[in-house]
Amino acid sequence: MTRAFTSETDTTEFMKDYNIITDANRIQRHLQTALLEEEVVEVQMQDRSRTFFSHMVDELPPLEEFTEEDGSVILQEPEYQEGSYLQRRELLLIAPMEPVNGNGLIRRSQQVFFRFPIGTNSLECTSRFLAIQTVRGNPFIALEFPTSCQELTQRRYYRSKLLIENLSKVIVHLPDKEVAICSLLDIGVNGLAFENPWPPPRLSLGMHVSIQLEIPDFPSYRLSGVVRTLINCRKKKDCHAVSCRCGIQFSVEDIQVANQPERAVAAIQRGHLRILRERADEAGIELMLPL
């Protein structure tokens, strides 16, 4: 959803369809869950309709120095609970945005709106820019911890994420027969997202492609689809690098073929929830998962 916000925006009409959340504990749980799930965050500034893309990052403590008996100094990770800085309810950190001009615009904006998916809906939070904060040498954007959020009833299909390095791949066939093996980022019953290796404008919105899913312990199969989204976003492991996420909507007419994505999503979701719960237990986080 893209819209322009101004100080005179009349929210009465569309607010009736939204669930307003003001409970700080619930907001904290949603933010911590989104951080663990590595969700893409959509950001808008007041008076601007342009949408920018980022993701939440952790406020990691400095590495600890230890001196060995031979006098050499080594760096080690200190004990730290993942996402624990959100418990202070003071701020949240996001990676530098794409397109890059948003990183300058946000400093001059009085109000900031950011959204991320929660199940089949989205959560939109109201915040403001605080500062540029450096974490282990990398600059991140510090936003004020939101005091209110709105659940947008978009009713979109849930996408199961792949949280760790895995062997799941998407073999993408372009109309001119060019082929590339791409990393699968998430998958739902009606579509998927992969990391696009082609430079722009090699892929374009509306382009029809053929895809082949290669998932461990799952039969390989082919589908056709249409390019629906192309999003540039900083990489999770390296905020200086930018990747392009390509979203594909499946074009499925045969009922037998349509059942294949459902089984693949179920298999990936089981692994996704297992990893997510393990990380949440280690960090002492109470997850906010869709029913």
Image: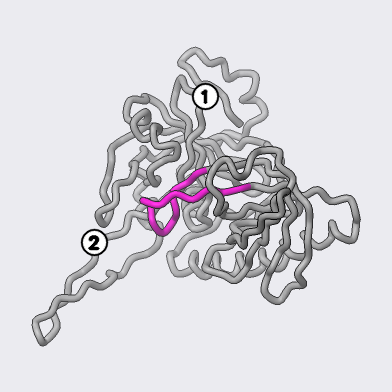
- Kind of residue indicated by mark 2: Pro
Q: Quadrant of residue 123?
A: top right
Residue 49: percent from the left, percent from the top? Answer: 52, 24
Marker disc for residue 49: 1
Q: Residue at x 78, y 65 (%)?
A: 221
**Tag nearer the camera, 2 or 1:** 1
Question: Residue pushed farthest front?
Answer: 176
Question: What is the CA distance from the residue labelled 2 to the residue labelled 1?
Answer: 37 Å
- Which of marks 1 and 2 precedes in the sequence? 1
Q: Position of residue 30 (x, y in %)?
A: 52, 49
- Of 124 and 227, nearer the camera is 227
Mark 2: which secondary structure?
loop
Between residue 169 and residue 117, name the one nearer to us. 169
* Left or right for 121, reference 51: right
Give the crowd class for mark 1: few <14, some 14-19, many >=20 residues within 10 Å: some
Residue lying at 49% horizontally and 67% vertically, measured from the top left: 279
Based on the picture, tell me whether residue 227 belongs to the magenta stretch: no
Q: Is 177 drawn above or below residue 94 in the view shown?
A: below
Location of mark 2 (residue): 62
- Residue 140 in percent (x, y) is at 33, 46
The magenta region covers: 232-246
Q: Residue at x 53, y 47 (%)?
A: 199
Q: Position of residue 124 (x, y in %)?
A: 54, 36
Check the image and name the residue furthest to the top. 8
